[in-house]
Amino acid sequence: MAAEPYDVIIVGSGAGGGMSAYHLTRSGLKVLMLEAGRHYDPVTETPMFNTNAEAPLRGASTPDKPFGFYDATVDGGWKVPNEPYTVAPGSEEFTWWRPRMLGGRTNHWGRISLRFGPLDFKPRARDGLGYDWPITYDDLAPWYDKTEKLIGVTGRAAPRHLTNTPDSPDGCLLPAPPPRGFEIFYERAFRAMGIPVVPMHGAVLTQAVEEMNGRNTCVFATPCGRGCALGANFQSTTVLLPPAMATGKLTITTNALVYQVDLDKAGKAKGVSYVDRVTGEHHAATARSVVLAAGSGETARILLNSKSAAFPNGLCNTHGMVGRYLMDSVGLNVTGQFPALEGLPPTNDDGMSVEHTYVPWWAYDKHKELGFPRGYHIEIGGGRGMPSAGLARLLRDDDLSVGDQLRANLRQRYGSAISFNGRGEMIPNDDCYCELDPVVKDKWGIPVLRFHWRWGDSETKQAAHMATTFLEVIDKLGGKPLGHVERDGRKAISKGGEMIHEVGTVRMGAAETDSVVNQYGQSWAVPNLFVTDGAVLVSSPDKNPTLSILALAWRSSDHLATLAKQGAL
Amino acid sequence: MSADPKLPETPASEPYQPKIDRRTALTWVGVVGAALAVGTGVVVYGPKTGGGKAVAAKGYGTDPKLNPPEKAPWPRIMTQGQLQASAHLADFVLPASGPAPSASALGVPDFIDEWVSAPYPDQVKDRPVILDGLKWLEDEARGRYRTGFNDLTSEQRRIVLGLLAPFPATSPQGHFFRRIRSLTISAYYTTPAGFRDIGYIGNVARAADPGPSDAVKAHVEGELKKLGL
């Protein structure tokens, strides 16, 4: 435990906050981390091998545990008690996932770890849509290398040179587990369509990495979404915080809901104010610099609530940029059932719970004819996983069998379904943003966020293309979709926020007038205030954001550490 | 590897013996006792009408204990008679077969009770479907045989249960049958005995993932060939 005075206060303990703490403490700085949620110990709290029969309602999802009883997210979800948010009248639906736990959403995330590609950093230069980052892929590439080596990411393969889908240099990636039966099966349909299927990049230790820090390798058995008591996948709480604590330079305070950045007379950040979520007491903490990594929504909320004479509309918001350009991923799912996979011999499909293979976007050169400008990748699930409370959905709608016939039908169809999940790029638009609600406050009197959302045609057309593609693949494989498939993209597309990839409220840029922070997450208005979470993202490519948040946070923290050593803060 | 959730895998017996453990049962008694003591009267056991009166019970909250998983905290609303009828129904859906135990031997009726007693929207929606369905069985038994459903001979009971499936899905009886069947499947196949029956052989720690067996690969290749892939 480090004691005051602190060099840095970090707000948040997930991907951005965890990586910042990891690098800053190892650079010799004294850090106070403030986490809004409770303490969480994955070693003792993770239900690793428990069956659904042991859980209430056989583990079925409920409003209290939306991803099922065993989901690692504790004390949070789509709704957090005492902490409302609002969606503006006339807006499309927006939903906001908030964990309230040490490590944030890194405890339950999907572990899909895809690098953004060169085109993702320069979308406007590419086709005039969206906005360009102040950095290129080459600027971030060394930090992707370091991040992959540290956290452990699968997907080792010979270089493929696919468009905008970077190959990692030798030594960065771990071996991918072999494709399972259903993965061998679907690959052939995509191949026939000229679409490559490649090893997934998943943040799972299929082998040891150089710096194990007490972690273990994967046992190929239990769902990563429950978390991992062995530390075999990436969670901030097993990979970043333990080595940061080991430096003796990190203090973590939990249940500390930060609502304001405090400034000194010179206009520099002197610390933050927070409320203890348990006692309701208000506290102030001080440090030489402040890093916000509370998640895109909360980070914007803290800035907007930090009002002063110099910043009447919120800190760093002189140009009205805070909260703007909120983005999510486009999401759409179609599940198919395949007679060809019926009656497979029993086999253990548990593997690492991240998909073993996936389909990167394949049609970069066809956007003109497709009629939508950006692409998506496909995450594909299936196999003979542990039966869940939803097992009966596997049966035909008209199947009313009982007894031995029912047992036989279930055995026959178990493992014969494959779900196709598109995750696509969203182009930022003026209708998607968050601001402070003029009326609603949380339990402690702090103004809450109000969201505005509207998918653009670029996204809804892309969603329709997902449905068409998945149906074509299902048909090629002799299957039938399960349930009704909506073909109208505007109806079929996921809700805003539903993919839990909300990013971009405090974007980085080359100039103060059209961004909030510079390429290092350092705010233009307050030079000792940094942002290292997904809020800084300028675009939201189809690739899941966590790996990029980690790499950016490492790069930004390194800059902060350099400035601190120079006495420039 | 976790242990079986302490459910005896013995043949179904009458009367149906709830498979909950004593500690859990005592917890519920405590909840009921406390509710009655403060006079809130929120706990309603065994609605006589089968109408599924709302129960003002609490869920497990956003931060339940996951390891080991805590038990569902809400009080159960089914009567012994309803549990018994559920046992007959569950065993109609999945009777014992060879080495596979019956649904009631795996405690499926207790799960149905836990489900219809739960305070969450999906379960609250199912509550009247299940309880009214059980009442329909009772009425049907009395109408045909002038005796309660649980007191029918096994042949009479098969006849009454056999009436359910032909009802259309949109009718209360058809909906009831589909829900009770689905819940029975959920409860049964999430147990280790269910895993054995369906052929789930995972949830075991391994040093490496060897990938699918040659038999699986051969099956897939054979099917792909048929599909022209």
Image (spheres, helix red, strand yellow):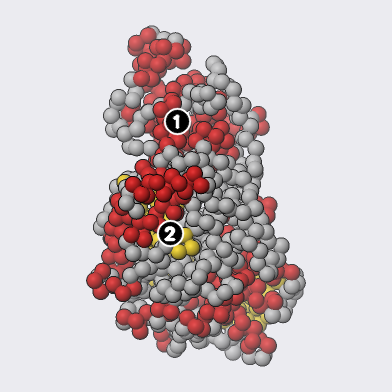
**Residue A379's mark?**
2
Seen at 65% across and 37% down, the residue is: B3
Q: Position of residue A210 (x, y in %)?
A: 68, 69
**Residue B176's mark?**
none
Amino acid carrying label 1: it is Arg
Apparent side of residue A132 relative to residue B76 in the rendered image (left or right): left
Amino acid carrying label 2: it is Glu
Q: Position of residue A116 (x, y in %)?
A: 46, 74
Tag 1, which secondary structure? helix
Q: Position of residue B27 (x, y in %)?
A: 63, 34
Apparent side of residue B195 relative to residue A38 in the rendered image (left or right): left
Seen at 51% across and 68% down, the residue is: A157
Apparent side of residue A183 relative to residue A14 in the rendered image (left or right): left
Q: Where is residue A52 in the image (x, y as percent from the top left)?
A: 55, 41
Q: Quadrant where the C terminus of chain A lies?
A: bottom right
- Quarter of the figure with residue A472: bottom left
Pointer 2 local density, CA inside 10 Å: few below 14, some 14–19, many at least 20: many
Q: Which chain carries label 2?
A: A
Residue placed under numbered mark 1 in the picture: A407
Q: Which of A208 and B71 is in front in this view?
A: A208
Identify whether A374 is placed above or below B187: below
Seen at 68% across and 61% down, the residue is: A215
